[in-house]
Each structure stands twice: as C-alpha cells, then as structure tokens.
Amino acid sequence: MALTSFIEVDPSSHFPIQNLPFGVFKPEPASPPRPGVAIGDYVLDLSAIAAAGLFNGPILSNSDCFHQPNLNKFLALGRPAWKEARATLQKLLSSTEPTLRDNESLKQKSLIPLSKVEMLVPMAIGDYSDFFSSMHHAKNCGTMFRGPQNAIQPNWFHLPIAYHGRASSIVVSGTDIIRPRGQGPPSGNSTPYFGPSLKLDFELEMAAVVGPGNELGKPVDVNEAADHIFGLVLMNDWSARDIQAWEYIPLGPFLGKSFGTTISPWIVTLEALEPFSCDAPKQDPHPLPYLAEKISKNYDIKLEVQIKPAGEKDSSVVTKSNFNHLYWTVTQQLAHHTINGCNLRPGDLLGTGTISGPEPESYGCLLELTWNGQKQLSLNGVTRKFLEDGDEVIITGFSKGNGYNVGFGTCSGKILPPL
C-alpha cells in the first residue's frame, strides 16, 4: 500500500511524504533559524519534534543537531543518521500513526504553512566548486568558440573539469541579483570596455550537498562517494558572459561568476531520489581506475527554466532538460575532487555545471539558446538575447513517481540594475 500522510498533499505537490526534503527557515522575522522538512504546503519544525523527544533512535536521541541554525551538524552525522531521521519522520507523518496526528498542541507548534515562513540557505557553505559535466553543453560552447573540429578539449573525456567558486555569494531562491560590472573584451584595436555586463545569463544546474567530509590527504573512493553526499539542490549559477570571455584565459572564471549563485531552499536527499536512479551514459574512453564506478548512475529529474521578462505578467518556458544528461556523475565529481587529498567538509557545495540535453530546446543557458546572441529568443512576443534588468528566471525540477512527485520547489531570482 502506498505511504500516505495525515496531512493532505495535492498530487501535483513537490513535497509528499515520499520526499521530505530538508531546509532551514524562520517562522517569524525575529525568530532564530531552525531546520525543517517540507510536507505538502507545510514545513515541519524539527526543533519542535526534537524538543518533544520524538527523535528517539540510537543516533539522534541525544543529538542537538535539530537545535542548530543550519544543517551542518546533521550533515556531518552521515548516512545512518539521515536514514534514521527519514524513517522517524515518515512514521510520524504517516496517516496511520497517532503520535503527531492526534496531538493538537504539538501539531500547532510544529506545522507551519510554507506561505508564512522565510527560507534561508540551509547550510553554512565553507567551499563551493563548480564542474563542467554535461557533454552537450561542453560541445556547444566549444563549437561556438573553437569550431566543431576542436569543440571538446582532449582532457574533458578523462576527468570531470571544475573550478573553485565563491561561497560567500551563494544566495537562497527569491534573492535579487544586481547586474555585475566589469571589463569586457575590446572590439578591434580599442581598449577593453568597463561597465555593466551586456551578456548576463542563467545556467541551469544542480548541486550536491556534502555530508561527512574526508581528512586532508585521504581521498574518497568513488564507490563510497555516495555516503558523502546528503542530497541535491537546484542551482542557477548566473554568468556574465562578456566579463567571463575576457578574463578566463588563462586561470578560468572569476568576476564573471562570483557576483551571485542561487540555490533552491530544499535539499532532496539521495534516499528520496533512489526510486528515480537510472544508468549514467556510457563513458568512452573508459575512465581511469579511480573514476571507474561499479554502478554508475544518474537520476531521472525533469528540469525546466522559465523567464518572466521585465514588466510582463506571464513567464515563458525556455528550456526543458533532465539531470540524466550528465556525462560525469556526482559521485565521480566528488571522488575526483578528493583524489589529490583535498578535504571536503560538511555543507560544501559541488555544482554540476550547466545541464544541457541534445536538442536545442534542452539547452541549459542563453549562451546556447541564442548561440551567443546570434539569434533572438521569443518569450510571448518579447525577445531576448541575454537577460535584461527586471527579468526573473525560475528553475523547477522534479521526479515523477506513481501518483506522486519528488520535487525541489523553485529556484528563482530577479535581475536588478547595476549599482
């Protein structure tokens, strides 16, 4: 029999009892932040559940991890604790369990409408790395700038390419993004121009949230890497393409990326995504032994990007992609990140890079959709090559189950004029 909650959940909701994603919220503006899980249109306050003594399993019964202002302490406890929390919460929220269902005062205290809370970045992010793991995206970008003969660099099929990003400018969905200023490429013999970015773009990404880290000098085995990943979030790694084009040779992205990265507030656990796992693409050439997985898997997560142009009432769908288009898996990304002994820590974030599919309507950024501004994109009669001030980008993602969805909610941000 399908698991159902005593809380009514609309079939189209991203947050049924099969999901239970973790986040951090404030019930009132002056309240301290606390961990919660989403269920239907509500957030369940985990600090209230913990205070009532309902996390009574061997790992969590004496832990104060749900009395923290972020999820880092819980993330550090590892998969056995995550599974215990999930089992406890699924039991408490199920339609057949009276403990919470029939306790009116605890329900009042612990279940708060999502519409009333303020969501925060759910963990303290010490470090953030961004990968380049979609073959279709790599091929399109390479074709644009180097031609089809040299589209993908020889190293790309041997290792998950990445760079170290800026953790301080990662913001939660709904935060406005100020258009960045910087240098752009000179035309002809002129000097480079300085000013607001003229080629502001979104990037459809997801990101893995690191749980337990690894000691400095001790790599994580690729076949054990999943135990170091708590779950996934949606991510928009905004890009100023003109600034990036002028600065990235020889050391890679800097000001073109560090002005802002938006993530969704809810972390969907790997346990909740397990029913939607699927085979990762066949890798050719076969990866080196430290990247060769016994089971190489992705997840079937449908992704969509909408743009709501400035001054317009309606948004338009510009991209439909899927997480399963990633060539390098998140576990390979994590194993590669640590192979030199680099120590990851709880709360670190690993971006996948832009997730583009093979078809033009599945391209994951405007750089690809407009082929670097050579084509116009039509949004209900309004046209765009890149983002304009006042434009809002909304990313959603979910996996379709039998009569339910396991989803991430939304990851949105609006562009404000430069300072």
Image: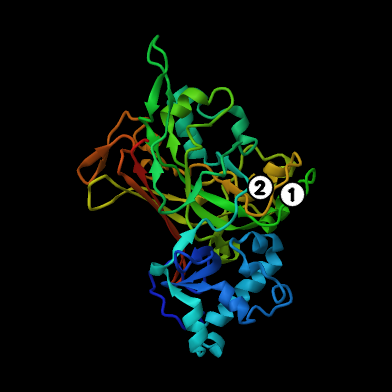
360 with respect to 310 (left or right) = right
Asked if labels 1 and 2 touch by Cβ distance under 8 angstroms, the answer is yes
Q: Whole-percent x and y of residue 82?
A: 65, 67
Quadrant where the C terminus is found in the figure:
top left
Crowding at mark 1 (Cα within 10 Å: few <14, some 14-19, many 20+):
many
The foreground one among 275 and 417 is 417
Q: Whole-percent x and y of residue 416?
A: 34, 42
User: In what element is the residue under mark 1?
Assistant: loop
Residue at 47% across, 65% down: 30
Crowding at mark 2 (Cα within 10 Å: few <14, some 14-19, many 20+):
many
Q: Whole-percent x and y of residue 371?
A: 36, 31
Residue at 60% across, 28% down: 154
Say which residue label 2 marks: 334
Residue 348 visible in the current orientation: yes
User: In what element is the residue under mark 2?
Assistant: helix
Q: Whole-percent x and y of residue 242?
A: 42, 27
Say which residue label 1 marks: 220
User: The disc labelled 1 sits on which kind of residue?
Assistant: Val
Q: Which residue appears farthest toward the left when viewing the image? A: 381
Q: Quadrant of residue 166?
A: top right
How far is mark 2 from mark 1, CA to CA? Answer: 8 Å
Q: Is residue 71 above or below residue 413?
A: below
Q: Which residue appears farthest toward the right when viewing the image? A: 217
Q: Residue 394 carries which label?
A: none
